[in-house]
Image: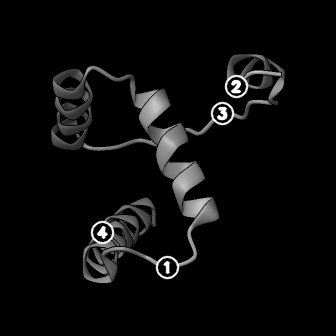
């Protein structure tokens, strides 16, 4: 079976989250500039992360995780 056939049979899940207007614009611009959909980019990134055995840029990932943690913390503190 070719990749397209496999993809049609793959179970899909919804990933959802609220981001700032600036972050949404960043995602849209990146995807538009690269001719891809956000869903496709998230799929590719998720698969790469799931299969990763040696991170290519540990420092960059750490920066992203640190930023995401700050955003999560800020949003959680607003809800209280």
Q: Which residue is mark 2?
A: 3
Please identify, in this view, whether the residue under mark 3 or under mark 2 is nearer the observer: 2
Counting from the top left corner in percent of width and height, residue 6 is at: 79, 25
Q: Which image quarter holds the C terminus?
A: bottom left
Q: Nearer the viewer, mark 4 or mark 2?
A: 2
Query: What secondary structure is found at the residue carrying circle 4?
Result: helix
Q: Which quadrant of the figure contains the N terminus?
A: top right
User: Mark 4 = which residue?
Assistant: 64
Estimate how packed mark 2 is, as few (under 14), some (14 to 19) or many (20 or more) residues with alpha carbons within 10 Å: few
Which badge, 4 or 1, is on the more N-terminal residue?
1
Q: Nearer the viewer, residue 59 or 56?
A: 56
Q: In the rendered view, does 55 fall on the left or right side of 46?
A: left
Residue at coordinates 40% horizontally, 66% vertically from top-left?
72
The residue wearing badge 1 is 54
N-terminal label among 4 and 2? 2
Q: Is residue 68 left or right of residue 52?
A: left
Q: What is the CA distance from the residue labelled 4 to the residue labelled 2?
A: 31 Å
Disc marking residue 14: 3
Q: Residues within 10 Å of mark 3 (few under 14, many from 20)?
A: few
Alpha-carbon span between mark 4 and mark 1: 17 Å
Q: Residue at x 72, y 34 (%)?
A: 13
Residue 51 against residue 10 in the figure, above or below: below
């Amino acid at each position: 079976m070719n990749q397209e056939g496999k993809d049609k049979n793959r179970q899909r899940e919804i990933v959802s989250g609220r981001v700032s207007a600036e972050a949404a614009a960043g995602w849209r611009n990146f995807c538009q500039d690269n001719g891809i959909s956000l869903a496709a980019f998230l799929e590719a990134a998720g698969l790469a992360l799931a299969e990763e055995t040696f991170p290519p840029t540990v420092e960059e990932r750490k920066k992203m995780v640190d930023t995401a943690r700050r955003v999560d913390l800020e949003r959680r503190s607003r809800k209280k």
